[in-house]
Image (tube, helix red, strand yellow):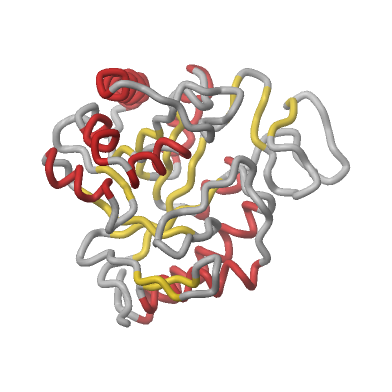
Amino acid sequence: MTPIKHKALINVDLGEAYGNLKCVGPHPKLQRCKSRLTHHRFFSKKKGPDEELLPLIDIANIACGFHSGDPLIMSSTVRACKTRHILIGAHPGLPDLQGFGRREMKLTPEELTAMTIYQVGALKGFLDVQGVRLNHVKPHGVLYGMMCRDLEVAKAVMRGIPQGVPVFGLAGTKMEEAAKEEGVEFWAEMYGDVKYSPDGMLVIDRVKKPWTNEDVEKHVTQQLTTQSVTATDGSTVHLPVKDYPLSLCCHSDSPGCVEIVKTARAVADKFNAEHGYS
């Protein structure tokens, strides 16, 4: 198996907060969200990890209000990314704040298209104010998983993506097939803090589980250098990223997320340097 053919970029989901609540994933003993106004002895900051993650990433996927995010948070996250010259994409999810967009729902194709237009349009409004272009769309959580398995769901979401804007997705699934059918540019993703099932699908946890730095390093290195991954049953699964541009995703609500992203960044930087990707 051969290495991937493009520079490995790091993308992270940001702005996943709501009102006075913000994700505080950096410690496994903490709940996923906690008030900004409180302090916890296991975590030295009152805010979430976004500010610490910004220097480590190339691309941000900003929550658009359905699974998380609100107007003020979307606005401030866009400004922060602009300051760091980070590419910004929309991160639309299912309308499920309580379940953080990680519970499956049944929606009609019309509903899926409309909710995508609605969420992407909301973020684009803030981007337009700052004079920043929309780089891509990356569906969130269970919606992403539904699109990997169900062609009609995937096509419905693709129809809500503005013309000329790429989608980030899992190669070799219905997402890739739908993007081709609907004329949407496709970027392949790999994952730094998500496990894969034996059929090459992602194992989407309701609440993220902790990873050791050693496991992240091994997981990311294998994907970048061999286009394969060790699945949950121990088998080796080929990742058909082909010649697509590639981005490696990590999550801001994973326990220890800052260390996870630092490790993924180091592996990606080493890979890029070894293969002459500037």
Q: Quadrant of the N terminus?
A: bottom left
Q: Is residue 106 above or below residue 269?
A: above
Q: Is residue 37 above or below residue 270?
A: above
Residue in the foreground of this view, choosing between 9 and 244: 244
> In this rendering, would 150 be left or right of 35?
left
Give the x, y percent position of residue 24: 69, 39
Residue located 51% across and 31% down the image: 101
Give the x, y percent position of residue 237: 40, 71
Residue located 42% across and 58% down the image: 248
Give the x, y percent position of residue 55: 52, 51
Q: Quadrant of the C terminus?
A: bottom left
Residue in the foreground of this view, choosing between 260 and 79: 260
Q: Can the viewer see residue 124?
A: no
- Image quadrant of residue 160? top left
Give the x, y percent position of residue 206: 60, 40
> In this rendering, would 272 be left or right of 151?
right
Residue in the foreground of this view, choosing between 236 and 11: 236
Residue located 58% across and 44% down the image: 252
